[in-house]
Image: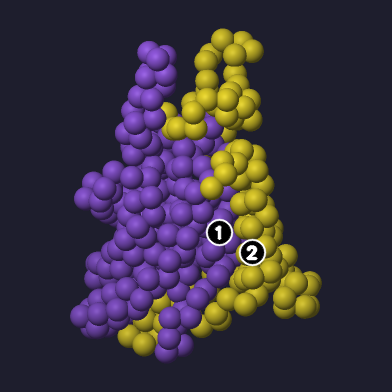
Chain colours: A yellow, B purple
Amino acid sequence: MRRVSTRALVVTGVLLTLLLAGVVSFYASSHPDGLNYVAEKVGFSGAAKPHASDGSPLSGYATRGVTDHRLSRGVAGVIGVVVVGLLFTGLTWALRRRRGDEPGGSTSPDAADRERDGSTPVGR
Amino acid sequence: MHVPDGFLDVPTSVGTAVVAATGVGLALRGARRELDDRTAPLAGLVAAFVFAAQMLNFPVGAGTSGHLLGGALAAVLVGPWTATLSIAVVLLVQGLLFADGGLTALGTNVTLMGLVGVWTGWLVFRTVQGLLPKRVSMVVPAAAVAAFVSVPVAALAFTGLYAVGGQAPIPLGSLATAMLGWHTLIGLGEAAITGLVVSAVVAVRPDLVHGARRVLATRKLVVVRPERDEVAA
């Protein structure tokens, strides 16, 4: 398959992720997940305490004030994707190893892509 | 597999919080070795994708559902240390904003999904990768097997924690059997999603897949040789 740039890969991935959280998530199964189901069957689901964030604006993946269920879950999902994405991108950006320490020597990911695209497409 | 508040007693929750905090602390150091200008952009996407995928419960029969845990997937794509951090961030946001996974159980959930899920996935991935032919295409089945195994192992880890500090008296044998049984089925879904996503990224940019680096390094030798012949001719 054709090799794509990092930017194209990330943009495609972000769009797909937003689509999954914003639209597809409405069609997810509403049955309890494995743990909750087992808790009900084996008999310890009653031990669960109310969540401290119950009643918060996005609690239960529903957006408060949005009455349409589809939109309510979709908006909550998109907000979650954006918050997680920004938080973790910020964290990894702060933690990452940088190319070269000399001033002006730092290379952006896209410049790095162009740099490598001229050569044999193999990993390091 | 988000554990709510109240399932486990306070000492057990404090214990898992200490384990989780230690794991995340180590991961903050370890992730530096995995992340560089080239791989950092993918890491944010992987965390966001795991969040989205965890909203997508798939039915596994008898009124039960499962969703991707994402530990093995993240470990193969961006490396196990970065994966631990990404799952921890997903769980933090889910707990704080979406009331999914108890806040006193955050340490438990990070331990189960961010440590047990990620590192079981990574160790199984490396083991299977070592057994299969050294080809980039083998990254996909290795990742799928790793994903499959990681789910029942995380379920067993929960059972172990419940045996130590469960708040309601229940027969532990039936808990272990039920957890293992259902999570083996959920593991099949985990394997399918992980295999699909890893194969998609491997197809277009194998060099960005952390778990493919070893095999790509081997392939490089094969590619270089003809160039030398051209120079000689």
Image location (x, y in percent) of residue B105:
43, 62
Image location (x, y in percent) of residue B136:
38, 45
Q: Which circle marks residue A21 in the picture?
A: 2
Query: The residue tagged with tag 2: helix, strand or loop?
Result: helix
Image location (x, y in percent) of residue B51:
55, 59
**Contact, CB < 8 Å: mark 1 with mark 2?**
yes
Above or below for B228 versus B185: above
Task: Name the residue carrying label 1.
Answer: B51
Image location (x, y in percent) of residue B187:
36, 69
Please give the name of the residue rendered at 40% of the width and 15% of the height, measured from the top-left corner. B233
Q: Which circle marks residue B164 in the picture?
A: none
Front residue (pair B230, A48)? B230
Output the chain of dot 1.
B
Q: Residue furthest front?
A: B233
Above or below for B170 versus B23: below
The answer to whether residue B135 of the structure is visible from this angle is: yes
Query: The residue tagged with tag 1: helix, strand or loop?
Result: helix
Q: Amino acid at mark 2?
A: Ala
Above or below for B110 versus B24: below
Please give the name of the residue rendered at 41% of the width and 77% of the height, measured from the top-left corner. A34
Output the chain of dot 2.
A
Q: Amino acid at mark 1?
A: Phe
Front residue (pair B200, A107)? B200
Mark 1 Cα-neighbour bin, 10 Å: few <14, some 14–19, many ≥20: many
